[in-house]
Amino acid sequence: MERAAAVRRIGLVVLGANVVLAAAKGWVWLDTGSLAVGSEAVNSLIDAAYATVVLAGLYLTTQPPDSQHPHGHERIEPFVALAIALAIFLTGGTILWDSVTAIVSGAATATESPAALVVLAAAAAVKFGLYRYCLAAGRTHDSPALTATALDNRNDILTASAAFVGVLGARFGFPILDPLAAAVVSVGILFTGVEVVRDNVPYLIGGAPSDELQSTIIRRALAHPDVEGAHDVIAHYVGPEIDVSLHIEVEGDRTLSEAHDIESAVVASIRTLDAVDDVFVHVDPKELGEWKADPETDRLVHGRDTRPTNGDDPAADGVRE
């Protein structure tokens, strides 16, 4: 419930901030006709729209497990992040088109109103605060949607700053700087969309987590005093969470009850990792000949690639230190 309350609160804060910014920028745009300010108004308006989508998505992801979704609803989050990416691409494309059209036609409009500079400076400050807030929350709660929102707010700082420079330059007799600044804004927006897609695709296609996390998982298994080695370790994303399967090697004289206790202890140890959802452990007794060297597992634990070198006993080159 703590995570659910946190992400909903953050979603409401982001939505409220973007509604206020969109209204302020829209009012200044209507008053001045500045394309740079107008592009920022459109940016904030779409930010408010996708903040609504994020809020709805986060509401779904924080619902408790049920009979049809026994693992909960967290796997919706990458789709929410991709919805954000689509909105980002739409925003960037629209602004880029308007900017290029204004540059080609020579219809650049300069504004003398200081209100444009004030609202853009205020927008940059607000976006910086939202960036730090969402980034910290995304890391704390391991939320792809909040991290995507943080990235968008980070680039909004740059785009608001570019618009500020454009409006300032136009006031000093270079009106072409206004649509040029809008074009810079659009490029920054499009780049954010690429980042969001890149960061969320692994969640949807079952990508592997970082080597550091995989190494931690294996070391947790090897930390048990009765585990002699591990192989066939597979860790992959299922939504924003990780499923793990691995084989552990134990002496074959263990009773069924002892083997069960070893397996349960290893599962419990790995499951304490925040990013891990399910863990599946297969116990291999030595006498069945299923102990084997695993170069990838050895690389993750020792940082080197090894091959069995002890004749018919590949387990002699296992990963236990």
Image: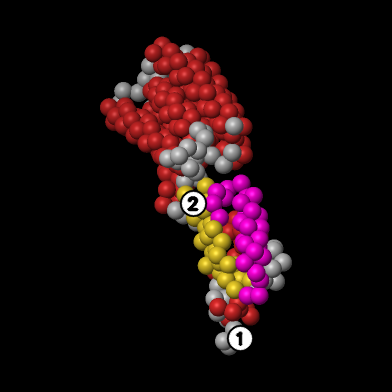
Toward which corner of the image does residue 293 lie, by quadrant? bottom right
**Residue at horizontal 55 percent and vertical 65 percent from the top:** 282
Residue 100 position within the rendered picture, expressed as x and y whole percent measured from the top left:
32, 32
Judging by the rendered image, the residue that carries numbered circle 2 is 237
Quote the CA–CA distance across marks 2 and 1: 35 Å
Toward which corner of the image does residue 226 lie, by quadrant? bottom right
Q: Answer few, some or many: residues within 10 Å of disc 1's Cα (few below 14, many 20 plus, some between 14 and 19).
A: few
Residue 247 position within the rendered picture, expressed as x and y whole percent measured from the top left:
56, 66
Q: Which corner quadrant holds the N terminus?
A: top right
Instruction: Give yes or no for residue 262 being in the magenta stretch.
Output: yes
Relative side of 157 to 218, left or right? left
Q: Is residue 208 visible?
A: yes
Say the numbered circle drawn on residue 155. none
Q: Which SS class for mark 1? A: loop
Relative side of 46 to 123, left or right? left
Name the amino acid type tagged 1.
Answer: Asn
Which residues are the magenta region? Answer: 252-279
Residue 12 position within the rendered picture, expressed as x and y whole percent measured from the top left:
52, 23
Instruction: Give yes or no for residue 267 being in the magenta stretch.
Output: yes
**Residue at horizontal 57 percent and vertical 42 percent from the top:** 142
Residue 154 position within the rendered picture, expressed as x and y whole percent measured from the top left:
53, 35
Relative side of 31 to 273, left or right? left
Q: Which corner quadrant holds the C terminus?
A: bottom right
Q: Answer few, some or many: residues within 10 Å of disc 2's Cα (few below 14, many 20 plus, some between 14 and 19).
A: many
Q: Is residue 149 visible?
A: no
Judging by the rendered image, the residue that carries numbered circle 1 is 310
